[in-house]
Image: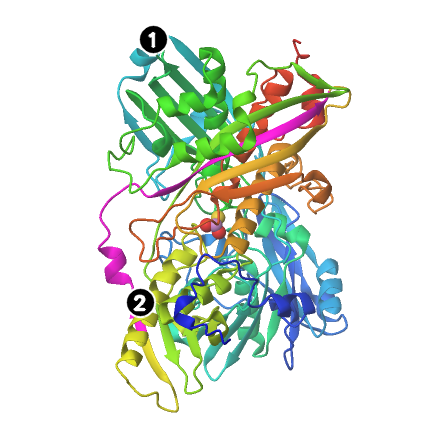
Amino acid sequence: MTTTTTATTARAVGTPHTRVEGRDKVTGAARYAGEIPFAGLAHGWLVTSAVARGRITSIDTGPVLEMPGVLTVLHHGNAPRLDTEYTGLLGTPDRTSALFQHDRVPHLGWPVALVVAETSEQAREAAEALVVHYEQQPHDVDFAGAGDDEAYSVDGYMPGVAAKGDLAAELAASDTVVDAEYTTPEEHHAMMEPHAATAHWDGGRLEIVDSNQGTMWVAHELALLFSLDPAAVHVRSEHVGGGFGSKGVRAHQVAAALAATALQRPVRVVMTRRQMFSLAGYRSPTRQRIRLGADATGRLRALEHSCLSLTSTVHEFVESGAGPARVMYDADAHHTANRVVRLDVPTPTWMRAPGEAPGSFALESAFDELAERLGLDPIALRVRNEPEAGPVSGLPFASRHLIACFEEGARRFGWADRDPRPGLRREGRWLIGTGTAAASFPAGSAPSTATVTAEADGTFTVRVNAADIGTGARTALTLIAADALETTPERVRVLIGDSDLGQAWIAGGSMGTRSWAWAVTGAATELRERLALGTGIPPEGLTVRSDTTQAVGALTQKERHSFGAQFAEVAVDVGTGEVRVRRMLGIFSAGRIVNPLTARNQLVGGMIWGLSMALHEEAARDRASGGVVGADLAGYHVATHADVPLVEADWIEDVDPDDPIGIRGVGEIGIVGAAAAIANAVWHATGVRHRALPIRPDRVLRAEPPRA
Ligand code: MOS
């Protein structure tokens, strides 16, 4: 008997597929930006400021220039000039990139010089020997002590303030009110691979080998900074060992490009782990006030969510913690505000689920508190408050399957058997509790281009300027192209991470795979149709290009989001205050899942980060020096294997109505709500609410003892 399998019957999308570059990664064949060999390479080492605010008065370059191998010391007095007044891809100019352009020091760890030498070791030794003199000025890095009067609202990627209804009147008329303040600490991306770039000039072109979340983004900003034609900058980024929002334009690329310009030879700059705590961006700490007022049935009359975060004196960045409330729940009076205070600190930036991660901790904790006071099940309270339309926008939801996620999650987690009373379940020294929380994240698409080539040998080459920052994007695009071409993934080669591939969205906003897949599908579908008509393949291949600008622009205005339900079970040691998470379950509605293997990996990774956020992560900023104490992965505690229990992520059947493939994106939603589910479980275990993250043992011990 013969079995024939035709390529057209196999659907790659929806089938688990290991990473197409997985073998390269585990065998070490995959090269990362800091280790790619270059002939004639010089090494730059950043020197960062030792004061938190002031001016550089002089730099003793003389002795350092005499040290072995040292080629130059770049600083504000001699570095090539940059144009720092441009408007970048993401709005206002970010003067965090204005390296060595002025003598002002805006925070501790600001780059004041780059020492370039023949070897990395020589550069480091000389950088450590460089003496910089400052006129020091008083600084203020105290977020906890920042007064509300210093705060101002600013429109970031969403309006600063949104308000409808009479908040005071609705609160007064409510049967039950929750009024609580929640805090989250400064958190760092802490990705495995440090920022690294090599820059060199080649035939009038600035060539950059980098680790980033979008080569076009970096190329575009460097072209503006160096007053170059965009085509004169070429950025490549083949493999990226984690980004999480931090890998955009940063000091390493700018410093390497400045040094390559000054020396006219290739220069590599790699950040140290310690430098990353002041140069890689981070998540601002937040202080959030929530007021919820409900009628006797649990329906919200009033919702106020005000989120205070910090920004630097260099650039305005807003951690939009009040964002989720604009999507999740409606109320007669609905007031949300994102406000910032300016301090002498490094500029914060996007970090996985910016806004949603800290905002959902506060909002979903407050919902649990409201459910407790109403004597309602937390899931029933959410069912009671499902909005008809966007609470602020008034727009219809393109799809909203939040309750379906809760129903499936509750069934699999065993929620129905839960005794809602806190502090009752004890196993030896451990108090046991369970908690839940909702998750949401915006689903967007951005214009992208792609080409697909039918090669003469029967294979296909996809070119799309995507970035795979560890997400599995390259593999997802391989599956998507295979289906659109009606071939097998083995016949498809996907080339990404190169600004010469053309315009495409960045790996950001959980929009990468969806935006790139749209373009790839367009080109692949047209190519397949042409081939079906019998169009011959010339020796150089047959190429079709697509551009989604018009299609994406034609999308109607709607509320587009993914949703999820998070569940956690914790055990709290009453003797030591230690919290152990025993299991987590997340059920998501995130559109069609392209590759279940890597999608689950993304969701579980996000949930583990939520665990880390709930229990471990906290950068302590020292008021005296202005810097982070213990700025390394020993001092900054992220969850490790021993902290992580059984974490399950799954999804409900869902096809996005507006996407040609029905997908949305799973990059960020996994972390949303995860910390709140854990905090709510800690309450259920102990009877004590923890409104400040992380839930450290000392905080558990200092809290009021359990009532049981
Ligand atoms: Mo993500 S914080 O959009 O890289």
For the image, the number of numbered tags is 2
Q: Amino acid at mark 2?
A: Gly
The answer to which of 372 and 614 lies nearer the viewer is 372
- On residue 358, the disc is none
| Residue that lies at the very extreme toward the bottom in this rendered image | 539
Is 375 on the left or on the right of 620, as rendered? left
Q: Which residue is mark 1?
A: 172
Circle 2 SS class: helix
Q: Amino acid at mark 1?
A: Ala
Dividing the picture into quarters, in which one does residue 553 lie?
Answer: bottom left
- On residue 522, the disc is 2
The answer to which of 384 and 680 lies nearer the viewer is 384
Is 308 on the left or on the right of 692, as rendered? left
**Residue at 35%, 10% in the rendered image:** 174
**Residue at 70%, 44% in the rendered image:** 640
| First in residue order: circle 1 vs circle 2 | 1
Q: Which residues are magenta?
A: 545-573
Relative image position of residue 560 (x, y in whole percent): 32, 43
Relative image position of residue 15 (x, y in whole percent): 49, 58
Is 673 on the left or on the right of 390, as rendered? right
Dividing the picture into quarters, in which one does residue 694 lie?
Answer: top right
